[in-house]
Amino acid sequence: MLKKLKEKKYFWVLKNLFFLIIAIPGLIFGFALFLRLVTQHGREVTVPDMRYMSVADASKIADDADLELVVIDSIYNKRLPRGYVDVQFPAPGKQVKHDRKIRVIINARSPRTVSMPDLKGMSLRQAMNELASKHLEVGQLIYRQDMATNNVLDQRIGNSAAVPGRKIECGTAVDLVLGLNSSSSTTTVPSVISMQYEDAVKDIKASSLNVSTIVYDESVKSYEDTLKAVVYRQGPTASKAPVTKGSSVSLYLTVDPERLPK
C-alpha cells in the first residue's frame, strides 16, 4: 500500500514536471507576443514627405500611413502657398511607430503685416538687412545722380511711396531709389552659378545689380523643383569688367545636374 502511494506521488510529480516543461516555452512566447502587441515592436512605418502639400492632402497621406498630422505653428514663406506644409518633424524617411504624431509648421493662412521701416539715409546693405528682418523683399534698385553712391534716397512700392510706419503685407517688394556718384558708378557681375534662386538674387542685388529675367528649364516640373533648382547659366557671365550699377542680370535654373559646369 505504501509502495503504491509512493509510486502514485512520483507519477504526479513527473506529470506536472512534464506539463511545466511544455508550458514554460508557451508562456515565454505568449509574453513576447503580448509585448510585441503592446509596444508595436517591428511595426514601424516610414514617414512620408508631406512638405509643400496642403494641410488637407498632408492629413490624408498621414492617415493612410497610420500617422497623425498635428499643426504646431505657422510662419511666413513667400514662395509657398498659404496653408501649405513648410516643415515637418520627424523628417521624411524616418522610421516611426504607428499612430505617431507628425508635427508640421505651415505657411500662415492669413496675410501677416509689418510696419514699413524708414530706410532713407541707410546704405544699400543696411536697407537689405532691414527689409529681410521684416520679411520684406528688395525690389528694383533705381539709381539717380547723387553725391553718395548706394545711399537710400527714397523707398517705393510700385508707383506709390512706401510710407514709414504704414502696415504692409510680408513679402511685399520695396523698390529702393539709390544715389549714384559718377566716381563710383560701376560694379562687377558676381558668379551665382550653382546657387539657388534666393541666394543668387541676394548676391546680385548686394552687387548693386537687378535681376531682370528668371527662366526655369524643362527639368523643373513642380513647386518643389523650383525650390531645389540652381543657376546653371547667367547673363551676363561673371566678370571683373565694370558694369553700371543698376544693370540687369538674367538667371537660368535647373534641377538637372548634367547642366551644371563640371
Image (spheres, rainbow, N blue to C red):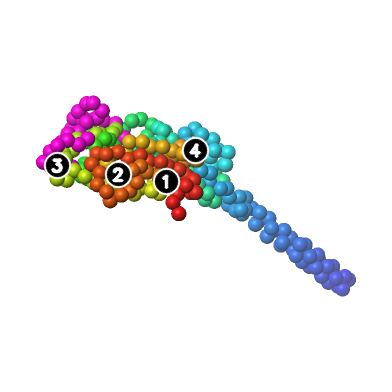
The mark that comes first in sequence, 3 or 4, is 3
Categorize mark 3 by other alpha carbons within 10 Å: few (<14), some (14-19), many (20+).
some
Q: Are marks 3 and 4 in contact (CB under 8 Å)?
A: no
Task: Locate residue 182, reporting x and y percent.
Answer: 15, 42
Q: Does dot 3 land on a helix, a strand or a loop? A: loop
Q: Which of marks 3 and 2 is nearer the N terminus?
A: 3
Instruction: State which quarter of the image contains the C terminus.
Output: bottom left
Q: Which amino acid does label 2 sit on?
A: Ile
As drawn, the label of residue 204 is: 2
Measured in 3D between alpha carbons, the distance from the residue under mark 4 to the one under mark 1, in whole angstroms, is 13 Å
Cα distance, mark 2 to mark 4? Answer: 24 Å
Residue under pointer 4? 218
Which residue is most to the front?
A: 241
Q: Do the residues labelled 4 and 1 touch (CB within 8 Å)?
A: no
Q: Residue 23, image x and y in percent?
A: 74, 60
Magenta segment includes 210: no
- Dot 4 amino acid type: Glu
Say which residue label 1 marks: 232
Q: Nearer the viewer, mark 3 or mark 2?
A: 3
In this image, 156 relative to 104: left or right? left
Residues in magenta? Answer: 142-171
Do tag 3 and tag 1 residues touch (Cβ < 8 Å)?
no
The residue that appears at 81% across and 65% down in the rendered structure is: 15
**Going from the N terminus, do you reach mark 1 or mark 2 first?**
2
* Amino acid of disc 3: Asn
Which sits in the foreground, 66 or 209?
A: 209
Residue density around tag 2, few if under 14, some if 14–19, many if 20 or more, within 10 Å: some
Which residue is at a point 30% across and 38% down the rendered structure image?
248
Q: List the residue tagged with mark 3.
A: 181
Kindly identify the residue that appears in the image at 58 percent across and 50 percent down.
44
Q: Dot 4: few (<14), some (14–19), or many (≥20) neighbours within 10 Å? A: few
Pick whichever of labels 4 and 1 is earlier in the sequence: 4
